[in-house]
Image: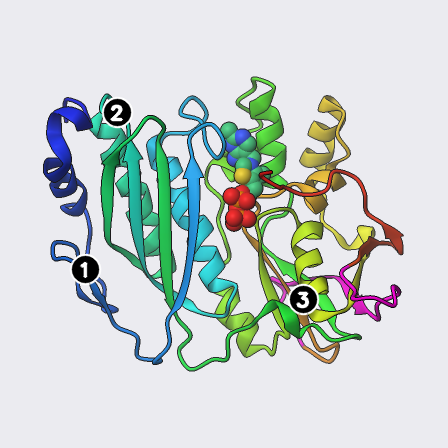
Amino acid sequence: MQGTVGELGEFGLIRELTARLPLTPAVELGPGDDAAVVKAPDGRVVATTDVLIEGRHFRRDWSTAYDVGRKSAAQNLADVAAMGAVPTAILLGLVAPADLPTTWATELMDGLRDECQVAGATVVGGDVVRGDTITLAITALGDLQGRAPVVRSGAQVGDVVAVTGWLGWSAAGLTVLSRGFRSPRAFVEAHRRPEPPYHAGPAGADLGATSMVDVSDGLVADLGHVAKASGVDIDLRAADFDVPAQMADIGQAVGVDPLVWVLSGGEDHAIAATFPSTVQLPARWRVVGEVVRTASAARGGQVTVDGAPWDRVGGWDHF
Ligand code: TPP
């Protein structure tokens, strides 16, 4: 396809984008009307939103439009899964400069569509607006299918802390990209296109998770939110984390302790959860620590590693 989104115009662009979308069983009415109609057999809807901005969340010289689509859908769908829900639909608000090639927008939509398909969802609507910086505002919806939502405030002293997914890979990829390299591919790909363990969200809920969180800002930072909300502290055991040899090698080459990527990297889109210590976890979960009574008489929220405060690069904060 030729041209720019400015040449195509708002309605032409919307036609191009929506033509690429399938309907799924959870959708009663797809794009094209004033609003979509998404089934919610559970009677409740899980809803979350994330905004992504060019330069801050992605770079066009680092990632293809397709990858940006996959990743930005994944970031939202992972939040839905981390509540214990099955994703059903996403909506896209797209801000695009008029000179954006139409193919960039259509490939973005293909990425969104394909990532949704992995999670069992689809794109049901959105809006396009002209603006100076490419910005994506994505809203994702999900169905708890009768489960209780797994919130951050449920961790209990004595619970184990377990993780599933890929920790540190995205941050290692971001480091090599930032230094002008395009390899090792495994890490760069993990940064461009994370693979959240969507199934582990509802499965974790069914296993009795007492709290659960999508790891987007770095494991220690995200578990800090759990600890704070639950009024407990969390202690992690460094030796229980998987630091692959290739990650250790790259860490050595660029002068970064790979444990910093694993514990504070961010954009992992792994799932971390707490479970009663009697839980029998499938192999895909790795137990990495435990919930301990808060040492500070105050409110909890401390995450320690081998009993010591973790103060090495404190997770991601936009401000
Ligand atoms: N620079 C570029 C060009 N791309 C990146 N992905 C980063 C830096 C790193 N980065 C951007 S946002 C982020 C990280 C590690 C953390 C998570 O983003 P946020 O918007 O806070 O997600 P949320 O916690 O809201 O899900």
Mark 2 or mark 3, which has the lower sequence index?
A: 2
Q: Residue at x 71, y 63 (%)?
A: 228
Q: Position of residue 158 (x, y in %)?
A: 80, 75
Q: Position of residue 32 (x, y in %)?
A: 12, 54
Q: Which numbered marker is on residue 104?
A: none
For label 2, the residue is 100
Task: Give the magenta range.
Answer: 280-301
The label nearer to you, 2 versus 3, is 3
Q: Is residue 274 visible?
A: yes
Could you tell me which secondary element the residue under label 2 belongs to? loop
For label 1, the residue is 35
Q: Is residue 278 left or right of residue 39?
A: right
117 within the magenta span: no
Q: Position of residue 68 (x, y in %)?
A: 39, 37
In depth, the one of 49 and 270 nearer the eye is 49
Whole-angstrom CA distance, mark 1 to mark 3, is: 35 Å
